[in-house]
Amino acid sequence: MKDVYLSVIIATCALMLLWISLSGYLNALQLGLGLVSSVAVIWLTIRLKLLTFDGVRLALLPKYPLYLLWLIREIIWSNLLVARIVLSPRMPLNRQIILTKPKQHSDMATTIYANSITLTPGTVTVDITEDGLSVHSLAKVFSDSVLANEMNNRIAGLETKTLKDDQS
């Protein structure tokens, strides 16, 4: 039951932070409307059984900001590579579909991995099967990057030891 309350509090706080950052106002009316909206969204999410209380999100949370910084750097670097390929007179493309096996133990972490691949320019996660993730790559440099498993290892590292034991 403690996980339920903790998840609700964290989700409400996250929604309030989003509300404040998007509205830009800190007056009582705006904060009150934000709180009412956040509570209403959480209530609907619980009612629709979309809020999970398995602790997976909480376990990923402490290491997630560092991963996001690394991901932003990768997105910027990949943007530059895509721009270079597109602006090149010969446009050195080597489109291919590759298969990568996720090392994550939870569905949440696997979803983060698939979405991170898609967010990085030059690669798109096409399908997720029991065999792994099918990834479309624009050029060899991007397929080599996916096959090097750096992103895969970083996301697997987000999962804590206790989470891995619970999922087994």
Image (cartoon, helix red, strand yellow):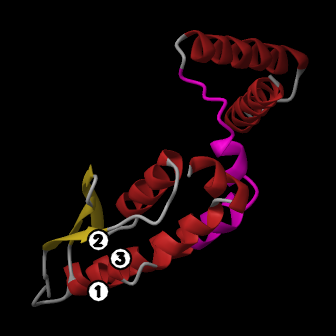
Segment colored magenta = 50-70
N-terminal-most mark, 1 or 2: 2
Give neighbour class at mark 2: few <14, some 14-19, many 20+ (Cα, 10 Å).
Answer: many
Give neighbour class at mark 3: few <14, some 14-19, many 20+ (Cα, 10 Å).
Answer: some
- Look at the numbered disc 1 and give the secondary structure of its residue: helix
N-terminal-most mark, 3 or 2: 2
- Contact between labelled residues 2 and 1, with CB atoms less than 8 Å apart: yes
Quarter of the image holding residue 72? bottom right
154 is higher (above) or lower (below) than 12: below
Q: Amino acid at mark 1?
A: Val
Total numbered badges shown on the rendered structure: 3
Residue at the far left: name it: 90
Provide residue 126's location: percent of width, then percent of height. Answer: 22, 55
Provide residue 109's location: percent of width, then percent of height. Answer: 52, 53
Question: Seen in the image, is 51 located left or right of residue 121?
Answer: right
Provide residue 16's location: percent of width, then percent of height. Answer: 76, 29
Residue at image mark 2:
122
Query: CA gap, disc 3 to disc 1?
Result: 9 Å
